[in-house]
Amino acid sequence: MCGIIAARVADDATPYLLDGLERLEYRGYDSAGIAVRTSTGGTETIRSVSRVGDLRTLVAARSGDPFTGVGIGHTRWATHGAVRESNAHPHADCSGRISVVHNGIIENADLLRDQLSAQGHVFVSEVDSEVITHLVERALAVDPDLMLAVQIATAQLEGSWAIVVLDARDGRMVVAADRSPLVVARAARGDFVASDIGAIATWAETFVALRDGDVVELGESWTWSSRGEVVPVPFATPSPFAAEALELGDHTDHMAKEIEEQPAVVAEILDRIAGRAVDGSMWRSLGLLPFERVAVIACGTSLNAGQVIATALRGLGGVPTDTVVASEADQAVLTPGTLVVAISQSGETADVLRALDRFADRYQVLALTNNLHSSLARRADAVLDCHAGPEIGVAATKTFTAQVVVGVSAMISALVSSGRIDRSRALALVGDMQRLPGLLAGAAEASLDRIPLLVSSVRDASGFLFLGRGAGLPFAAEGALKLKELSYRWAEAYPAGELKHGPLALVTDGTPVVVVDNGEHKIQANVAEVRARGGFVITIGGVGADVPALGRDAGRVLSRRTDGTDQGMSLWGPLESVVPLQMLARELALQLGCDVDKPRNLAKSVTVE
């Protein structure tokens, strides 16, 4: 949550800051601001409680001393303090000399604020981040070295932080991180800092990710400190994203683009890993010990993907599984021999990282993430890259499908490696999975015309039920989550067999009930129960369904294989069902006038608990 950008360039820094903030806006968009050093040695701060586009207008309208090439910027997702300009970043010290942007949570901020106030420091905001500016100011009063001042300041902090500190007096810039992501990059145009490499990929082909406890001064040469000790600058890593992959192209929004990309993403994943899943080498390369049980730890969409992976492991190999909501991990009791599979798109999900505080020392941890340089990747014993590419829309789409495909492939490889299934069975399973790109494309084709008409019939409904049975249930849960995120309508997913145990009381004339019909033999009886109470049923299934999106390979209806080899995917569910579910949520949001890329109150990377 929140996005940080900083630049040290030869020309005006503001175009870089504003462009970077627009690319980071998916991390938070409650407010935005920049602080740029001027030609007269001061700092000018411009902030807005609207989107980055409004900030760009304010910058264009300013008059005053020319800007230099040194500046910092921030787009905020509010945690401490209301959404008002005084709480927007950057924050300044009492003298206006020091400006700071911060991502994270300072847990001892109230105590530090009281101490600093007692010493005469004046606070102008409600946010925890402002204490950092005054801590740096206090340290500089004793010693004029900015890097030392930042080290002294961060040593007093408890919580998580990624910060950039700008000194207006001499233009020095120091960055620091602990349990919050931050990358630095040197390019032909200058030095850049960002929360996410995607924000600066246009200008920088390589980057270095800060590790916990790092403090770095940028300048003609970089000074790199780790836990208080000066160390060599780490080797740079090539950017994983092409700059054009971050652009909209011909699409109206990023979500539409990312839904459409799913067949290609899955095809590329299978090209990378299919053979290694069949022979067990994908699993053996991870270097993990044998396991007797698996516990999936995740949040939100990643938790739903984890449910699908766990279903596959149980169905294909008979391996016991647990699914743990990361924020409730304190209640989990794991048994010896358990492998922890921690899933996070960003690799920075705070609840997942805190859950590992309980488990990492006692259990092997396998991370499944879209960011190999993330905090989660660094803390795990082994890492799987979900290979989804950049995802800008806040509501996850292609990262869900990527997590499922990589996770299920890894579990098949583990079952082969452990002797639970033989290679011929694995070959049939993976061969069946290679139909997925066509199935996803076929689901999109089948949904394109039907979804808008169905949504127009239910757009005024205040709440929705999503139903599934067996392997279809996690997909119903993902559909309900997407609808809530994007349209701000209540939506709940239930096992269809639970209807008579309470949820059926919610159904009245016109109540929308979305059913993932993956062929479970009792689902039709549940649909009949809903229709008998006047519910408006939308079935997502095969031929004859309201949205006939399942089992269609790019428009061609597939018949069931006589050799039974399609039973592998049926054991872990209809992945192609997510396409109409995503399209349903997006279409409802658009018809209601909602921003599908930036839903209210949400951010892409949940870096605070």
Image (cartoon, rainbow, N blue to C red):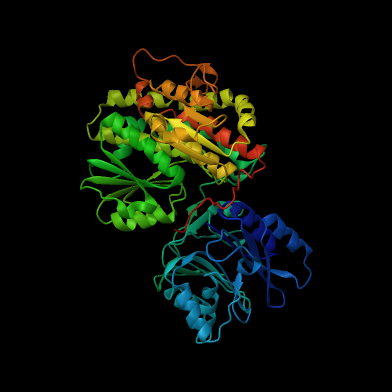
- Judged from this view, the residue extending furthest toward the top is 562
How many numbered marks have been drawn onto this rendered protein structure? 0
Vertical comparison of 217 with 407: above or below: below
Vertical comparison of 462 with 364: above or below: above
Q: Position of residue 458 (x, y in %)?
A: 61, 32
Q: Is residue 144 visible?
A: no
Vertical comparison of 374 with 548: above or below: below
Q: Nearer the viewer, residue 529 or 399?
A: 529
Vertical comparison of 285 with 144: above or below: above
Residue at image x 67%, y 56%? 52
Occupied quadrant, residue 483: top right
Q: Is residue 240 visible?
A: yes
Residue at image x 31%, y 49%? 365
Q: Nearer the viewer, residue 519 or 245?
A: 519
Q: Position of residue 375 (x, y in %)?
A: 41, 56
Quadrant occupied by the C terminus: bottom left
Q: Nearer the viewer, residue 509 or 451?
A: 509
Q: Position of residue 544 (x, y in %)?
A: 52, 16
Occupied quadrant, residue 187: bottom right
Q: Position of residue 251 (x, y in %)?
A: 66, 37
Q: Is 126 on the left or on the right of 48, as rendered?
A: left
